[in-house]
């Protein structure tokens, strides 16, 4: 059997080095290669010529002698699929634009649709207060979405619906029960399986000097709040930053004044925008994306990880912090309460008071101890389902 795996999602694009979909694709790909059996003659990987290189994926392909295929547009992608004698296609992230492809109806296709983020982003932006508008161009874009967003929502809805009919032998997977329910309600299409996003795996061991990494980023163990992916407005980091900034200006929490806030993932074009929004600049450290091993160290040593996202299909980052039993403050949005249950402290992501109360609760020792007792139990249940579902998806692809 010959299988084609689309690994486009792992490639850097638009200044973003990594994302949840890419991490998902890499984890599944790695696990497949450990379990491939003799009946699989070949695994081919599809990559985009217009995106950057993902070194660890290319290293894995080289190690296992994987054939690489490249495309620069959907017509070329379609040609590779239809003329490659493939028996099965796996899309770890099935993008809406793939609905435009006309592929062989007899092909077996396994497609993972993580969420309806492009649709829901427009719906959220219509009611948001546009915290992330940086300039006049951004303002007019926001106004355009408010007045004409429904047109694009309808177009995206139809594209997502067509993904369910790419071939006569489709299996549609999503990564949370929340995502399934949203899809079945908005698209009126049936999702075949809910299989949780697997936990990340360290493929190559790092020789990590934790103290030097913390020193490099000017933070101390257990004395900083961690926020990530700050260049993406849907991650909602600016609202949390402004709340923390106000708290630093008050005398409500004495212990808070010994803390820093490390904000990662601010690309250069957003740096001055963030700097202008902050009054207590000595408490905030703004940096671009950090390396994978550095982020591990930051999760492990943070006083708290804050994840105020407005939209998630699954929402992997809190689990990366929880494996070190780092306290997490999480948005109540979308899939997060389903995934993390009672192991985190929740807040309403568009309510400043709710965010402030959640920060305050971190200094209530009795309450924090109660939450910590639940972390092990909840994360154990999550890990067990992730392991079970990872095995199941690999079996589906290789059967």
Image (spheres, rainbow, N blue to C red):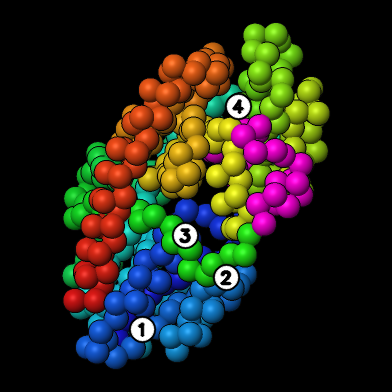
* Crowding at mark 3 (Cα within 10 Å: few <14, some 14-19, many 20+): some
Reading the image, the residue beneath label 2 is 54
Give the SS element for disc 4.
helix
Q: CA distance from mark 1 to mark 3?
A: 19 Å
- Residue contact between numbered discs 1 and 3, judged by CB atoms under 8 Å: no
Q: CA distance from mark 1 to mark 2?
A: 18 Å
Against 331, is 254 above or below?
above
The label on residue 123 is: none
Give the SS element for disc 3.
helix
Magenta span of residues: 209-237
The quadrant holding residue 130 is top right
- Residue contact between numbered discs 1 and 2, judged by CB atoms under 8 Å: no
- Residue contact between numbered discs 2 and 3, judged by CB atoms under 8 Å: no
Reading the image, the residue beneath label 4 is 240
- Asked if residue 243 is among those painted magenta in the image, a careful observer would answer no
Left/right placement of residue 128 relative to residue 86 reads right
Q: Residue at x 39, y 71 (%)?
A: 29
* Crowding at mark 2 (Cα within 10 Å: few <14, some 14-19, many 20+): some
In the rendered image, residue 328, in percent from the top left (x then y), is placed at 48, 33
Q: Residue at x 61, y 26 (%)?
A: 239
Reading the image, the residue beneath label 1 is 43
- Residue contact between numbered discs 2 and 4, judged by CB atoms under 8 Å: no
Give the SS element for disc 2.
loop
Q: Which badge, 2 or 3, is on the more N-terminal residue?
A: 3
In the rendered image, residue 139, in percent from the top left (x then y), is placed at 68, 33
Q: CA distance from mark 2 to mark 4?
A: 31 Å
Against 168, is 178 above or below?
above
Residue 152 makes an appearance in the image? no
Q: CA distance from mark 1 to mark 4?
A: 44 Å
Q: Which badge, 3 or 4, is on the more N-terminal residue?
A: 3
Against 263, is 209 above or below?
below
Q: Residue at x 69, y 27 (%)?
A: 259
């Amino acid at each position: 059997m010959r299988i084609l795996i689309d690994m486009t999602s792992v490639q850097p694009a638009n200044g973003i080095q990594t994302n949840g979909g890419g991490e998902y694709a890499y984890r599944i790909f790695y696990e497949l290669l450990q379990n491939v059996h003799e009946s699989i003659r070949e695994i081919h990987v599809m990559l985009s010529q217009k995106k950057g290189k993902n070194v660890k994926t290319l290293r894995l392909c080289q190690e296992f002698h994987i054939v690489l295929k490249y495309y620069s547009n959907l017509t070329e992608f379609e040609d590779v699929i239809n003329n490659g004698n493939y028996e099965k296609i796996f899309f770890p992230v099935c993008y809406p634009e793939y609905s435009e492809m006309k592929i062989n109806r007899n092909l077996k296709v396994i497609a993972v649709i993580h969420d309806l983020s492009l649709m829901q982003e427009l719906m959220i932006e219509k009611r948001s207060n546009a915290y992330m508008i940086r300039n006049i161009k951004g303002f007019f874009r926001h106004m355009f979405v408010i007045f004409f967003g429904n047109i694009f929502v309808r177009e995206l809805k139809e594209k997502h619906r067509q993904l369910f009919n790419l071939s006569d032998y489709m299996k549609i997977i999503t990564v949370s029960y929340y995502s399934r329910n949203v899809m079945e309600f908005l698209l009126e299409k049936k999702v075949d399986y809910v299989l949780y996003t697997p936990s990340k795996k360290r493929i190559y061991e790092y020789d990590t000097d934790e103290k030097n990494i913390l020193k490099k980023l000017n933070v101390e163990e257990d004395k900083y709040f961690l926020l990530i992916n700050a260049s993406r407005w849907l991650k909602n980091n600016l609202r949390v930053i402004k709340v923390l900034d106000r708290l630093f200006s008050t005398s409500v929490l004495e212990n808070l004044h010994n803390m820093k806030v490390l904000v990662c993932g601010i690309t250069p074009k957003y740096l001055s925008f963030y700097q202008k929004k902050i009054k207590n600049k000595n408490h905030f450290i703004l940096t671009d994306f950090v390396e994978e091993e550095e982020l591990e160290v930051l999760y492990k040593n943070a006083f708290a990880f804050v994840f105020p996202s407005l939209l998630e299909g699954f929402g992997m980052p809190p689990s990366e912090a929880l494996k070190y039993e780092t306290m997490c403050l999480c948005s109540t949005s979308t899939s997060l309460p389903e995934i993390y249950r009672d192991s985190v402290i929740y807040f309403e992501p568009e309510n400043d008071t709710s965010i402030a109360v959640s920060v305050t609760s971190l200094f209530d020792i009795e309450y924090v101890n109660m939450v910590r007792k639940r972390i092990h139990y909840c994360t154990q249940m999550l890990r067990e389902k992730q392991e079970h579902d990872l095995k199941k998806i690999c079996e589906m692809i290789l059967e």
